[in-house]
Amino acid sequence: MTGRESARRSAAAFSIARTGAMVLRYVYILRGSWPRIIELAYWPLMQMVMWGFISKFLATNSSWVAQGAGVLIGAVLLWDVLFRGQLGFSVSFLEEMWSRNLANLFVTPLRPYEFVLSLIIMSVIRTLIGVLPAALLAILFYRYSVFDLGLPLIAFFFLLMMLGWAVGLVITAVILRFGLGAESLAWIAMFAIAPMSGVFYPVAVLPEWLQAVAWALPSAYVFEGMRAVIFDGSMQLDSLVTALLLNIVYIAAAGAFFLYTFHVARRDGLLMSVGE
């Protein structure tokens, strides 16, 4: 056996060292990205919290779902508005990141606020494309129409979209600052507020200290308002006004944060390397 053949066989043989080196590489990648580490524990934790509160509520209110036909389907559809509103905003931004086109955009006269407005419009379009077919299927499969909510549905839609835009602005600012290592935030951020939003159960189910957090979220007022329409046929105008005011505050704060981060990214040359 020649030395060359021996070397070839040695290279083809299984190597614990090479396997260990690759594992070490992935450990370093994971260790260097805090969003990836958080994501590992995030989904099991959110599932436990969400379904724990749902189980707690239904255990003491077994007739609740029967009394409000379609209340859970309505909650799912409105939750999808909130989730897709944020995701549509963030993914439109990420598409520029994935194609490494962000720097090209901002050598044009395009202004940051014009860019944000385009993301908002795309968020509405993406949400309608995603939610309308689901709403129609709910009529076909379950004989429940979310459109039966009437005029309050329009208010619920735009209040949830506004919150999605505020969260989307924060997420895009973080990605702009830390790069694509933080892109998973676009998919997980909304689920962090889901337990406090009372999507499938009233806010009263939450521990008292957590209720205070819930009432600082516009989404909590929307889902409580949805249940009031379904169960009592009443529209809680004061709750909707409170949700609107909170949304305005959050969008203003998120917009200021995005513009500041964009200024820093442009100053430090991050727009050229933001896809890395």
Image (cartoon, grey):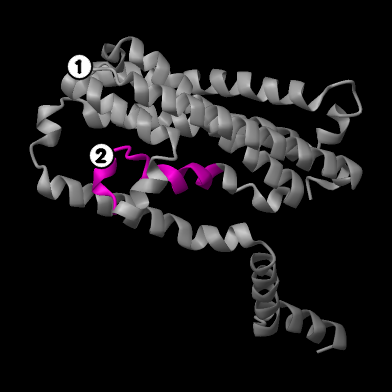
Q: Position of residue 231 (x, y in %)?
A: 17, 24
- Dot 1 or dot 2: first in sequence order is 2
At a point 54% along the width and 61% down the height, the residue shown is 38
The amino acid at mark 2 is Pro
Q: Residue furthest top?
A: 151
The amino acid at mark 1 is Gly
Q: What element carries label 1?
A: loop
Label 1 packing within 10 angstroms: few (<14), some (14-19), many (20+): few
Residue position for label 2: 202
Residue position for label 1: 233
Q: Position of residue 2 (x, y in %)?
A: 85, 88
**Relative to residue 92, is residue 271 depicted above or below?**
below
Magenta span: chief secondary structure: helix
Q: Does the magenta stretch include residue 188?
A: yes
Which region is colored magenta? 187-207
Q: Is residue 91 visible?
A: no
Q: What element carries label 2?
A: loop
